[in-house]
Amino acid sequence: HLRSRKDESKKYFWKKARRWVVERTHSWLNRFRGILIRWCKKTENYLAMLHFACGIITWRACL
């Protein structure tokens, strides 16, 4: 169970809640089927696919 953002902001008023950053990143990476299903069994190939997906996400953000 996760705390609501209202409770989180009261407890740590000096610190802004940034939990959504990770959730958004996972959502972006889940759009790539090769990463989501993990067709590659070798770690090197999976890491290369992950880097490739991050590069595409960054490239799209720059456009």
Image (spheres, grey):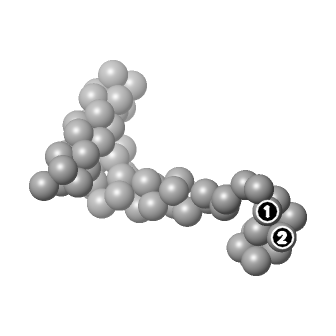
Estimate the x, y position of residue 12 in percent, counting from the top left. Answer: 81, 59
What residue is shown at x 32% (from left), y 38% (from top)? 50
Q: Quadrant of residue 15?
A: bottom right
> Which residue is labeled 2 in the image?
10
Find out whether the residues at labels 2 and 1 contact each other: C-beta distance under 8 Å: yes
Q: Quadrant of residue 54?
A: top left
Look at the image and tell me whether residue 55 can be seen: yes
Residue at disc 1, secondary structure: loop
Q: Residue furthest front?
A: 14
The correct choice, above or below, for 63 with respect to 11 in the image is: above
- Residue at the farthest top position: 44
- Residue 13 in the image, given as x and y percentages of width and height: 79, 62
Residue under label 1, please give it: 13
Q: Residue at x 51, y 56 (%)?
A: 21
Cα gap from disc 2 to disc 1, whole angstroms: 5 Å
The local crowd at label 1, few if under 14, some if 14 to 19, many if 20 or more residues have their Cα within 10 Å, is few
Q: Which of 40/55 is in front?
A: 55
Give the residue type that dot 1 points to.
Phe
Q: Quadrant of the N terminus?
A: bottom right
Across and down, in percent, residue 17 comes to: 66, 61
Tag of residue 55: none
Disc 2 crowd, CA 10 A, few/some/many (<14, 14-19, 20+): few
- The secondary structure type at the circle numbered 2 is helix
